[in-house]
Amino acid sequence: MTQKTIIIAEAGVNHNGDTGLAIKLIDAAAEAGADMVKFQTFKSTNLASARAVKASYQKVTTDKSENQLDMLRRLELTNDDHLKLVEHCQRRGITFLSTAGEVESLRFLAETLNLPTIKLGSGELTNAPLLLAAARTEARLILSTGMGTISEIEMALGILAFGMTYTDDLNAGREAFSDALLQNGIWDRLREKVSLLQCTTEYPSAVEDTNLRVMDTLHSAFGLEIGYSDHTEGNAISFAAVALGATIIEKHITLDRTMEGPDHAASVEPDTFADLVCGIRQVEKALGSGIKRPSPRELENRKVVRRSLVAARLIKGGTVLSAGDLTVKRPGEGISAVDLWDIVGRRAVRDLVQDETLRAEDLS
């Protein structure tokens, strides 16, 4: 049986700082059939300095005159907001998940909300202090790898391995992070605790930049659970990712793609997200077990469309059969066509009329 894909509805900052809108996004995700709904938890002043400029895509969908810090202030949720959202998720039967933007927020998610799983965004792939703190929470971690290289991902895993092993940072550093991956049993621990998502950090991202085959590369290199964070328009690439082995799919959800905000244009609306869930579940069924065998319906059709040996002409009882006496035709209820050469040379025990299907009892 194919493993069920975890489908994450990325509400992100599409609430625009409004908890009422955030609750509607939870409702939409739950009704669409998502397994988790994910927000972003950050203290804006810990996340960006006043000198931080916006990304190009953010300038298109938000006020061009404000800097990144001002934008983040508008999108920041309070701790009390988070508690309300967690409670609403519990009522709707969907798992609350969030991305930790910095260490203070990480600790809030792990220690106050007690989340069993925490997301780390692509921007944190080289954020060693946050990765170390995340490793020490004991939470399961989902790490996006957008903008990264294999060596950077390996270093990030080394940082996590170091954090899982040591309680202080006295010997921390690149060499120590690399050495941490050589410890006995550490890869079993990483496989238990860490999933990697292939991701293209652009909103929306171009199909030609998707590079889904990287999922195979990551799995071969590290042996961890692999998924895909989809920023493309539509659902087709997520379906392809599941077919290629992704066990986690993350996709942005919004109530209206035309709303002002940095991620709405790269999101899908509730009806499309519901189609995503339905399509992924169909792909899972289609993937099957990998064992090549006929399905129950095929067994019924096999009798109709396969060929049996039939008499090519009138065959008198006692005739020693030659290849010319026989041909192959539907239905496939008699002796299989593959047995033609084994039947040649055997004797008919009764008269067989033209087109009559041969049976084992018809031959000596």
Image: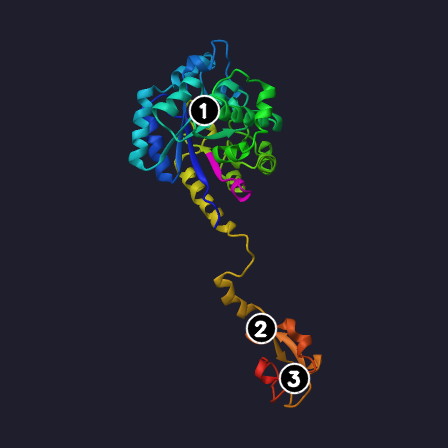
For label 2, the residue is 330
Q: Is residue 114 left or right of residue 4?
A: left
Residue 244 counted in the magenta span: yes
Q: Is residue 129 above or below residue 309?
A: above
Q: Residue shown at 30%/31% (left/top)?
A: 88
| Circle 1 or circle 2, nearest the eye | 1
Residue 272 counted in the magenta span: no
The stretch in magenta equals 241-250
Which quarter shows the C terminus? Answer: bottom right
Tell me if label 3 and label 2 are in contact, CB under 8 Å.
no
Q: Which mark is residue 136?
A: 1
Say what amino acid the circle numbered 1 marks.
Answer: Arg
Q: State the image coordinates of residue 161 (x, y, percent, origin top left).
A: 53, 27
Give neighbour class at mark 3: few <14, some 14-19, many 20+ (Cα, 10 Å). some
Of the two numbered discs 3 and 2 on the same chain, state the one appearing first in sequence: 3
Q: Nearer the viewer, residue 12 or 223?
A: 223
Say what amino acid the circle numbered 3 marks.
Answer: Arg
For label 3, the residue is 313
Q: Residue shown at 42%/17% (left/top)?
A: 72
